[in-house]
Image (tube, helix red, strand yellow):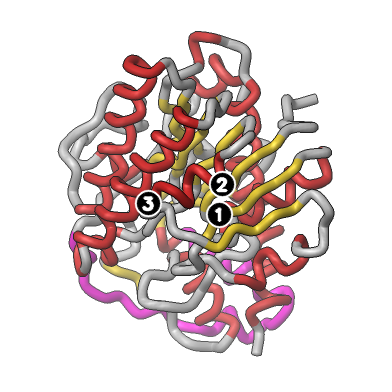
Amino acid sequence: MKRIIENAKVLVTGGAGFIGSNLVEALLPQGNQVIVLDNFATGKRENITPFMDHPNFTLIEGDIRNLEVCKQAAEGVDYILHQAALGSVPRSINDPITSNEVNVSGFLNMLVAARDCGVKRMVYAASSSTYGDHPGLPKVEDKIGKPLSPYAVTKYVNELYADVFAKTYGLELIGLRYFNVFGRRQDPDGAYAAVIPKFVKALINHESPVINGDGTHSRDFTYIENVVQMNQLAATTENAAGVNQVFNTAQGENTSLNELIDILKKNLSQFDPKINEVKVIYGPERAGDVKHSLADISKAKEFLGYEPSHDVALGMREATEWYYNNLKN
């Protein structure tokens, strides 16, 4: 059986968000006390509504840009799973200052809170955007290029700060470079929605999804269950060589956007055959986007014992069923 976090006190920052709420859902049945810190800038109250009456669940409505709030949330905590951030490359291009305040200053506050409150270990959401313009595929943790967006800069700075805090203050910190995570509770609305729920909602409504570029861009789409597994493995590893490291958190296979549309149509047409007839619109490429993304996950396998439970096909089947039941009008 895979290692899990159990009978511990765990703080999930950004716990009302897509990834954070899935972590909370996994942690509560494992005998943990779970604290969520969220300011609901991007998180949704409905994501944590099922947990609000759980005796081991606590919500702190606050902002990671406030150090005192961070310390309050981290008091007496064993593990921090730090998911709070302003995601999205386009958002960071449109508003680099706020992205920096949340993703860098907020992250620094959480490090200080972890240090001052004696937290055992903090696992934090890093990003595949850190690979920047490095041309190599698959992406290997120790080979990165120059960042291509303000968002990528902020996530790289997180890794630099984590390294310094580990060496200077003796903190145990592990970064997980997420690759295009998808799954239940992922928001399809808003200007900065992730591509999969956005495509799914369009298809369900018989509207043409818009692909930026010619559809040959590819991504290592990673199902949420694999991300939940990696957070728990990182928090509980006793392999000293795996601590104060960063790990690719991915499936280890890439899928083009054209292939993605085909997979989504195939799965969704089981509920509504007319979805197969929906045409795709191709638009201009997006600033700051990399052409291809594919992770080498051998380091996570070696140091953490990671074995993805869901490949893209299985993840898409589970996800599209959830999307269809929750997003149809």
3D distance between C-alphas at marks 2 and 3: 38 Å
Mark in front: 2 vs 3: 2
Element assignment for label 1: strand
3D distance between C-alphas at marks 1 and 3: 33 Å
Contact (Cβ within 8 Å) of mark 1 with mark 2: yes
Determine whether, in the image, residue 267 is placed left or right of residue 210.
Answer: right
Q: Is residue 156 magenta?
A: no
Q: How many marks?
A: 3
Q: Which residue is mark 2?
A: 73
Q: Which residues are magenta?
A: 259-287
Q: Within the image, what quadrant is residue 101 found in?
A: bottom left
Q: Quadrant of the C terminus?
A: bottom right
Which kind of residue does numbered mark 1 sit on?
Answer: Leu
3D distance between C-alphas at marks 1 and 2: 7 Å
Residue ID at (65%, 49%): 35
Which kind of residue does numbered mark 2 sit on?
Answer: Ala
Q: Which residue is mark 1?
A: 37
Where 197 sits versus 104, above or below?
Answer: below
